[in-house]
């Protein structure tokens, strides 16, 4: 009802000062209830009045004796206080001025006169009225030395408070210096100490002037101690700061004051939260010491400085990392095998390796995570196999693509001295996983670059070494993190670009590509259900037959993986989805007879076989990053002086193979039935089509030699025989690599006979049994054996003609 606008000890009129304290106070007075202020005698204060009963009380007072009883509420939130909601002792005040404000409120200027106690409370009137008994202060007949000292102490205390920065009006100090009454000095001092309502009310209720002044002096001494501490803090802070750091100085003052008052600032609460997290964190002593050090640094920093943000970010990373959080491995071998079989068809070697790891893991908990490298052409399921392994193990899966990464800091992180520093992608992945034993897949490790910022593959040497990665040290963290529980899986299309030291740390598992039968099963079990679902179809709308899938594989795709096969299946699903959307409700059967209606005519592929046997054209097989492919070696002769021309973007090794083949043919011309003058009267041109594609490697030596001999002897080369092998000057055939990829390429192209070096016979173990039955493998040790199987001799042609 009455709110204080500005507490102020204004000058008291001389007439009022000389007025007899034993005023004629009516027994019944209207009451003005105050919310947040206690008015003392001799105190003048402006009050704002808003409640109706309070306005009525003021009107009644002004119309009679201008006196009103000021009582303070115990709880300022109570809107309509009763007798029990107000204190018993208040102050009788004189209303000096009254002003009505435009918003309906009333502003009065009231001067406290004398204390009064409530005898009764009347609330039935339009205003609150109380019957009061005036409290007269007892007279002090003799001033003791103690009382005189107390008065002096209070006076000097007020002056000292002013000198220490307390906002006390000068006129108050003048009055205090001239007042001899102890009670009046006590009230004057209490009115200017900005006390809490409860404390001020207690002083108001003390009747004995000496006791009251003593209590006021105690509060004044406490205020002086606080002001003195504030002044001391201010002096110390000024000694540390200069003019340019004024804002920092003010915050330091606040911080020091809060420390003395026992109040916690925002940064202190943050530090406390970090310390609580650290108490629950299970880490090594080295990590704990580093975290404690950074928390200590943070406590000494300015909250708004840039360095504070760096330390805060570092601590957030440290507490977010799963130092000891691990997921429980699924060690049920049958369940794991079932999950692997559900997700991928074939790939037996890889699945067997994962089951072996689980078997050992179930026997020993100390086994370190393996470092596997899946090498194979695109589309064979290397990345999806990593997800499947994580699902089978019951672990989190994190994938990181390394294609085109050139900065070593991507792996090891940046040191915290750099602006915007962050941990490397290894630690970032571990944080995202939320466990310290995820399956971590690094895609495309053969495509890592290297420049002036370092070589990322060299940085990975520590990560992918089980003997070192238990204490992997990221530059940002600066402390070791245990990566030994992580199962790292890398993928690559080629092994050659990978550094030897890097490659040596990984267990290589080759995924050469799928046979036609494997592609069929993958399509039926995985690709078709997936595409039907993605195109919002159901099994009632579309049905693929095995014949249709085989035709797509043979006539529309030519690849080691199944990506193009999935695209073709998606193309069929799109066309069916359109018809369903147009209102055709029936089952669309996709068969080998109607597949052309959906995909158009069969495509022509570069590795389709020749239509007939030809002179100077031999069929070879090569291994590429996308799997195996067949290639044709063409040789022609023309009038000249025995020169050799080589075209088709051939590498140095392949050029040397062509030179070796020509030298062998010249050295064994008589044995091979080659005219003796052919090498002095003819030039030879060796060409391998698709000249825009670079080609290299020694395994085309046998094929070049066969095509060269065919030209020299005019014997045709059999179109249905493919060949591979390295040739020596003596005519020996040396073993080659990539046998499975080359055999699969030959089988895709329709070849049924393939010539291989005899030492490669052991590699047939990797060939699927069905293909071994379909194809005929001719193993050779010398070029003479190759010529015998690959060239069509004159007597053989005559037999063919006779049979025709």
Image (tube, rainbow, N blue to C red):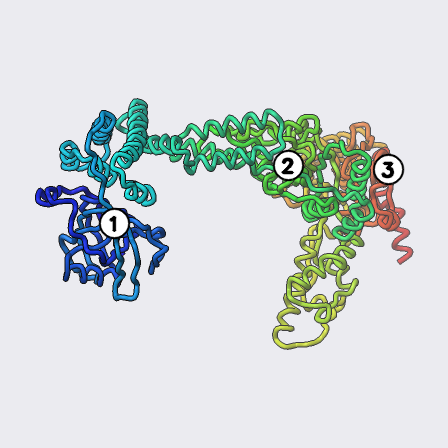
Is residue 152 visible in the rendered image? The answer is yes
Instruction: Give left or right: position of 336 versus 531.
Output: right
Q: Nearer the viewer, residue 708 or 86?
A: 86
Residue at coordinates 42% horizontally, 28% vertically from top-left? 300
Residue 672 in percent (x, y) is at 84, 35
Q: Quarter of the image holding residue 108?
A: bottom left
275 up-or-down from 711: above or below: above
Which residue position holds label 1?
A: 116
Q: Nearer the viewer, residue 450 or 250?
A: 250
Look at the numbered disc 1 and give the secondary structure of its residue.
strand
Q: Quarter of the image holding residue 733?
A: top right
Mark linked to residue 761:
3
Q: CA distance from mark 3 to mark 2?
A: 30 Å
Is residue 669 visible in the rendered image? The answer is no
Residue 218 in percent (x, y) is at 31, 32
**Most extreme residue toward the front, as rendered?**
141
Look at the numbered disc 3 and give the secondary structure of its residue.
helix
Mark linked to residue 446:
2
**Most extreme residue toward the left, as rendered?**
15
Residue 430 in percent (x, y) is at 61, 38
Q: Nearer the viewer, residue 504 or 599?
A: 504
Instruction: Give left or right: position of 447 versus 730.
Output: left
């Amino acid at each position: 009802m009455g709110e204080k606008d500005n507490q102020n000890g204004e000058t008291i009129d001389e007439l009022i000062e000389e007025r007899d304290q034993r005023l004629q106070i009516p027994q019944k007075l209207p009451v003005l209830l105050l919310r947040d202020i206690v008015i003392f005698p001799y105190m003048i204060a402006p009050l704002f009045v808003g409640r109706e009963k309070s306005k009525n009380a003021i009107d009644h007072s002004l119309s009679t004796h201008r006196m009103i009883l000021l009582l303070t509420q115990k709880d300022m939130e109570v809107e309509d206080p009763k007798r029990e909601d107000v204190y018993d002792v208040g102050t009788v005040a004189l209303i000096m001025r009254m002003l009505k404000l435009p918003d309906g409120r009333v502003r009065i200027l009231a001067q406290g006169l004398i204390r009064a106690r409530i005898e009764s409370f009347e609330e039935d009137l339009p205003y609150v009225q109380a019957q009061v008994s005036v409290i007269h202060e007892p007279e002090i007949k003799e001033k003791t030395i103690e009382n005189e000292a107390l008065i002096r102490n209070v006076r000097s205390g007020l002056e000292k408070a002013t000198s220490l920065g307390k906002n006390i009006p000068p006129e108050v100090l003048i009055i205090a210096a001239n007042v001899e009454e102890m009670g009046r000095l006590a009230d004057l001092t209490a009115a200017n100490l900005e006390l809490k309502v409860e404390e001020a009310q207690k002083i108001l209720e003390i009747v004995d002037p000496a006791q009251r002044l003593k209590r006021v002096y105690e509060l004044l001494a406490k205020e002086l101690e606080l002001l003195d501490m504030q002044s001391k803090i201010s002096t110390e802070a000024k000694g540390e700061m200069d003019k340019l750091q004024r804002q920092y100085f003010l915050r330091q003052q606040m911080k020091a004051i809060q420390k003395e008052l026992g109040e916690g600032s925002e940064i202190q609460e943050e530090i406390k939260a970090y310390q609580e997290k650290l108490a629950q964190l299970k880490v090594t002593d080295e990590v704990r010491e580093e975290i404690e050090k950074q928390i200590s640094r943070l406590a000494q920093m300015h909250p708004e400085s840039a360095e504070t943000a760096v330390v805060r970010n570092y601590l957030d990373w440290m507490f977010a990392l799963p130092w000891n959080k691990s997921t429980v491995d699924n060690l049920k071998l049958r369940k794991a095998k079932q999950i692997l079989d559900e997700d991928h068809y074939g790939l037996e070697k890889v699945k067997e390796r994962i089951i072996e790891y689980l078997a050992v893991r179930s026997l020993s908990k100390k086994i370190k995570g393996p470092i596997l490298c899946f090498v194979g052409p695109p589309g064979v399921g290397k990345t999806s196999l990593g997800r499947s392994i994580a699902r089978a193990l019951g672990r989190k899966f994190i994938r990181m693509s390394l294609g085109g990464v050139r900065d070593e800091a991507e792996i090891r992180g940046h040191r915290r001295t750099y602006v915007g520093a962050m941990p490397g992608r290894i630690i970032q992945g571990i944080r995202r996983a939320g466990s310290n034993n995820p399956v971590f897949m690094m895609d495309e490790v053969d495509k890592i670059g290297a420049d002036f910022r370092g070589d990322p593959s060299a940085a990975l040497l520590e990560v992918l070494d089980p003997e070192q990665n238990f204490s992997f040290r990221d530059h940002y963290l600066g402390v070791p993190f245990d990566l030994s529980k992580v199962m790292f899986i890398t993928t690559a299309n080629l092994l050659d670009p990978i550094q030897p030291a890097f490659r040596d740390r990984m267990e290589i598992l080759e995924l050469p590509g799928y046979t036609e039968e494997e592609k069929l099963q993958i399509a039926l079990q995985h690709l078709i259900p997936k595409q039907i679902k993605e195109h919002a179809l159901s099994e009632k709308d579309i049905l693929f037959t095995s014949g249709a899938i085989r035709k797509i594989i043979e006539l529309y795709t030519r690849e080691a993986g199944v990506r193009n096969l999935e695209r073709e299946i998606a193309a069929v699903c799109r066309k069916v989805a359109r018809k369903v959307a147009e209102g055709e409700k029936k089952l669309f059967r996709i068969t080998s007879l109607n597949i052309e209606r959906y995909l158009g005519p069969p495509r022509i592929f570069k590795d389709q076989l020749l239509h007939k046997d030809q002179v100077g054209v031999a069929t070879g097989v090569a291994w590429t990053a996308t799997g195996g492919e067949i290639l044709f070696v063409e040789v022609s002769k023309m009038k000249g002086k025995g020169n050799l021309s080589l075209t088709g973007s051939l590498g140095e090794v392949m050029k040397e193979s062509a030179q070796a083949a020509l030298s062998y043919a010249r050295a064994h011309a008589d044995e091979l039935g080659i005219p003796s003058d052919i090498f002095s009267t003819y030039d030879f041109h060796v060409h391998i089509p698709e000249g825009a594609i670079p080609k290299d490697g020694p395994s085309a030596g046998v094929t070049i030699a066969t095509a060269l001999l065919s030209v020299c002897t005019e014997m045709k080369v059999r179109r249905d025989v493919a060949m591979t092998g390295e040739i020596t000057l003596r005519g020996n055939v040396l073993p080659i690599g990539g046998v499975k990829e080359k055999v699969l390429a030959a089988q895709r192209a329709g070849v049924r006979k393939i010539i291989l070096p005899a030492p490669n016979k052991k590699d047939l173990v990797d060939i699927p049994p069905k293909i071994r039955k379909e194809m005929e493998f001719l193993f050779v040790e010398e070029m003479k054996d190759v010529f015998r199987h690959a060239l069509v001799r004159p007597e053989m042609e005559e037999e063919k003609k006779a049979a025709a």
